[in-house]
Image: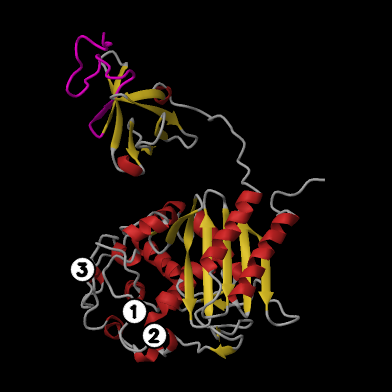
Amino acid sequence: MTTSQEELLPATRRALLHRIAVAQTEGRAPSLVAAVVRGGRTVWHGARTSVDGHGPDENVQYRIGSITKTFTAVLVLRLRDEGLLDLGDPLEKHLPGTGAGEATIADLLAHTGGLAAESPGPWWERTPGSLRPELADVLGEQPQLHPVGRRFHYSNPGYTVLGALIEKLRGAPWEEVLRREVLEPLGLDGTSAYPRAPHAGGWAVHPWADVLLPEPGENLGRMAPAGQLWSTTADLARFAVFLAQGDERVLSAETVREMRTPAAPMEAADVADGTSCGLGLQIQHRHGRLLIGHSGSLPGFLANLTVSIDDDVASVVLANCTSGPPLSTVGADLVRIVAEAEPRIPEPWRPLPEVDAGVLELVGPWYWGTYAFALRLTSDGSVALEPLSGSGRRSRFRANGDGTWTGLEGYYAGELLRAVRRPDGTVSHLDLGSFVFTRQPYDEEAPVPGGVDPDGWRGIG
C-alpha cells in the first residue's frame, strides 16, 4: 500500500490536531481554525471550538486584521510593475500635502517611514471610522516620530496612506480595486471588507475568569487598508500559494520574491529575535527555518499566515478572541510539524538540455587571493559562486546575455562578473567588481592587484 504524496500521514494529522487543540485550550479561544498547505494545495484543515456539536469549517469568515496590509502591499507593487510609480518615489510626488511626504513608497511598505504606530484620538480599532474621515485625522499634526529610513517602526497609519495612494492612482475605492485586481483573479471569494455569513463573532475572554464579552466590529473607514478584511482558512491558503509562487494575473514570481526580501534596517533586538520586514510581509528565522507571512489582530480576532518557501509548506491559523493563543508560534509549529515529519521530496535530478561551452569552461575552483571558491552552473542557466570551506561571500548571478553576469544576493548583489580572456582566447581570470579570481592562488600569470613575488611560494627553513 502506498500513500499519495499529496496526503498527510495519520501521525502527522494527529500531531497537527494536537497542536491546535492545545492552543485552543490553553489560549481559551472560543474557536480556532487552521489549515496547512503543501505542494500548492490545502492538505489539512482542523478546528476546535467551545460550542458542542459545532466546528467551523474552512469557509467560515474570521477577521484577519493586519494580514490586510499584505493585500494592500500587493496592490502597490502592481502599480510599480505597471510603471505608475517607483518604490523610491517620495510620497509627496503622488500624494502631496500629507505631512509625511518625505517617506518613500518603499519606506511605507517596510514600516521605515518614521510614522507613528497609531492614529491620534480614540483607539481606532474599537471606534467608528467616521471619527477619522480624512488623512489628516489619521496622521495627526506630527505624523513622523523618527527620521525617514533609519529604523523599523510598525505603522498602521502608513498603510492608510498607501491605501489613499492606491485610490488616487486607480481612481476607485481601495476595496473595489482590491476585489477587482486581487480577490477575483485569485478566486478568493470568501474574502471581503465586511463580514458575510457564515462568520465568527468576535469575543474578549476575561483574563482571570472563563467568561466572555462581545467585541464591537467597527468599520475602520480610512484605516481599512491597514486591517479591515475578513477571510477564511480556505482563501488564505490560496493566498499563501500566491505569496510563494506568484500569479501572472496579479504579480509575477519575481515581484513576490521581492516582497519576501528584507527591506527594513534591523535593531539589536530584531537581530536577536531573528525577525525582519519585507514589503508588506513579516520575516522570521525560527528553529533554523526561514518563514514569511503576516500576523493580524483586531478586537475579538487573531490571525496568522506563515509560509516556508524552502519546505513548500504554509499554515493559516484564525481565532475569535482578542488575546490568548500565540498564533505566530502555532503557525510556525504547524509548518515545522509537517516539514520535519514529512520532508519535501526533491524533484528528480535531470541533466541540462544544452550548455554553453564558454560557460562550462568557467566552472570549477577559483581563488581570490588564498580564499578558495567554486563557480557552479545551476539548472536555471545562472551561475553560483560559493566558498569551498567555512563561511564566506556567496551569490547567484544572472546571465546578461553578453557573457557577463549580475549578482543577485549578498555582498555581490548588483555587481558585475565577467571572464577576462587572453589574446589567444584562453581565460586569464574572473573579474568581480574589481576582485580578481584566478585558477591558482595568486597566479603569477594573472593581473593580481599588487603583483606576485617573483620568487613564488616558499617554506621557512
Mark 2 lies on residue: 124
Residues at marks 1 and 2 touching, judged by CB atoms closer than 8 Å: yes
In the shown orientation, is residue 215 left or right of residue 118?
right
Q: Residue at x 34, y 19 (%)?
A: 439
Identify the mark at residue 118; answer none if there is no mark.
1
Dominant secondary structure of the magenta stretch? loop
Vertical order, 29 against 22 (above or below): below
Mark 1 vs mark 2, CA separation in Å: 8 Å
Disc 1 marks a residue whose amino acid type is Glu
- Magenta span: 433-461
- The alpha-carbon separation of the residues under discs 2 and 3 comes to 25 Å
Give the colour scheme shown: secondary structure
Q: Is residue 387 above or below residue 90?
A: above
Q: Which residue is mark 3?
A: 102
With 57 as the anchor, is 373 left or right in this view? left
Quick check: marks 3 and 1 in contact, CB under 8 Å?
A: no
